[in-house]
Image (cartoon, helix red, strand yellow):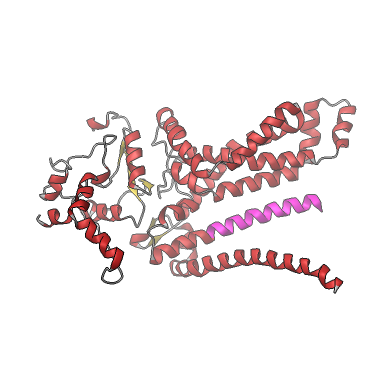
Amino acid sequence: MKNFREKLPGFGFLLIACSTLSVLALITIFIFIEGVPIIARVGIFDFIFGMKWAPSQGAFGIFPMIVGTITVTLGAAIIGIPIAICCSIFLTEFAPPAVSNVVRPAIQLLAGIPSVVYGFWGLVFVVPLIRNYLGGPGLSILAGSIILAIMILPTIISISEVSLLALPRLYKEGALSLGATQWQTIRAVLLPAAKSGIVAAVILGIGRAIGETMAVIMVLGNAVALPQSILDPARTLTTNIGIEMGYASGEHQQALFATGIVLLVIIMILNSIAQFVVRRRNG
Amino acid sequence: MESTGRQDSKIHVITREEGSGTRSAFEILVMGAAEITPRAMVQDSNGVVRQLVGDDPAAIGFISLGLVDEKVKALELEGVTATRDNVINGSYGLSRPFLFITLTQPVGQVKQFIDFTLSPEGKELLDAEGLVTPEESETE
């Protein structure tokens, strides 16, 4: 009886854990059931590399959106990653406690702002700035990248900060006692030692950027053509689903689910890379 | 081009998403066999289209007459201004019906609602929103 009582909670938690997994499985199965027929009909090559998206004419090519996703995410990474890593170095190595105790919660607060608020701020502040000073319609890859860069900051900063803090004190003390300056210690000892954690932080941040929808819909312009410059409007895989799902039916709806499959595969690949990097550190 | 006030800029075309009723009406009434450029920016509501056109001197888009306000200018079509009267008398050609659809003959609250829209009180509301009421447009 006692044995049973001991095992019961474990069994209960197992059930709950499985129910979480089953949600993932159900969503995946549903998306595939809805999306695979249209990919089969159009052909996987023509679907992924097709240049024209016009569901009312039966044209289902998502290549411009794949390019849109990659460029917007890359832009966000280029703007966001250096800021985030510098910020985490500042918080762990330079900031006096009085400062870091204000900056740290403030950064975490960034993560709590709803994405529609970021999008709205982008629309009324960033977009007119770009339109007036750089030209083009303002709604652009650049606007999307700037908004996403801000949105991925908390993810990257928190995880890199944790991995920097997790380093044994010995590393830093050893380097300093060998006569290295503080900057030399950070650059040659601490950053390389925390590399895998920082890489994982970056990948998770990129995953967040790829998945973001609402903020991006508002500032990206959502044009279906292949963008020619960073001042052109573009459409990502997520915004394609977000903007068209409302009125879609039949094959159009299937094609949006198929867009979801492509997105799911991309994010699964990214998460696997992050897992692999983190495991290598721990293993 | 004078009305854009900025002749050195490309025109920023704004359209609605695939599947939108406003877009399909625009495609049927205006575009015909031609295609809206894939370079056009796509927004998912009349309100956002109005907002963007209102902010950007080089932008052009299409929205329902009922949503036109002082922030944007409704263009003349072959010399005819976009007003309720011109839609009613048929001289402004870009109009389309809004439809109520039900699964069966409307009953209960659904019927009451439809009757309300067609009642004098409902018509007053539609007028106030800049929309054209059924009987008026039937006379065209």
Q: Quadrant of the C terminus of chain A?
A: bottom right
Of A128 and B96, which appears nearest the observer?
B96
Who's the residue at 40% across and 47% down the image? A223
Q: Is residue A277 magenta?
A: yes
- Could you say where residue B54 lies in the image, as x and y percent from the top left? 32, 35
Q: Quadrant of residue A265?
A: bottom right
Q: Is residue A31 magenta?
A: no
- Could you say where residue A83 lies in the image, as x and y percent from the top left? 63, 33
Left or right? Give the position of B42 relative to A118: left
Q: Residue furthest bottom?
A: A1
Whether residue A180 is situated above or below residue A168 in the rendered picture: above
Who's the residue at 29% across and 34% down the image? B71
Whether residue A12 is situated above or below residue A103 in the rendered picture: below
Of A138 and A119, which appears nearest the observer?
A119
Left or right? Give the position of B64 relative to A282: left
Q: Is residue A37 visible?
A: yes
Magenta range is A262-283
- Could you say where residue A222 lies in the image, as x and y percent from the top left? 42, 47
Q: How many marks?
A: 0
Who's the residue at 47% across and 66% down the image? A39
Left or right? Give the position of A2 relative to A88: right
Who's the residue at 23% across and 57% down the image? B116
Q: Quadrant of the N terminus of chain A?
A: bottom right
Whether residue A45 is situated above or below residue A122 in the rendered picture: below
Q: Is residue A95 visible?
A: no
Q: Quadrant of residue A154?
A: top right
**Magenta residues: mostly which secondary structure?**
helix
- Could you say where residue A87 lies in the image, as x and y percent from the top left? 67, 33
Left or right? Give the position of A16 relative to B106: right
Q: Quadrant of residue B79?
A: top left
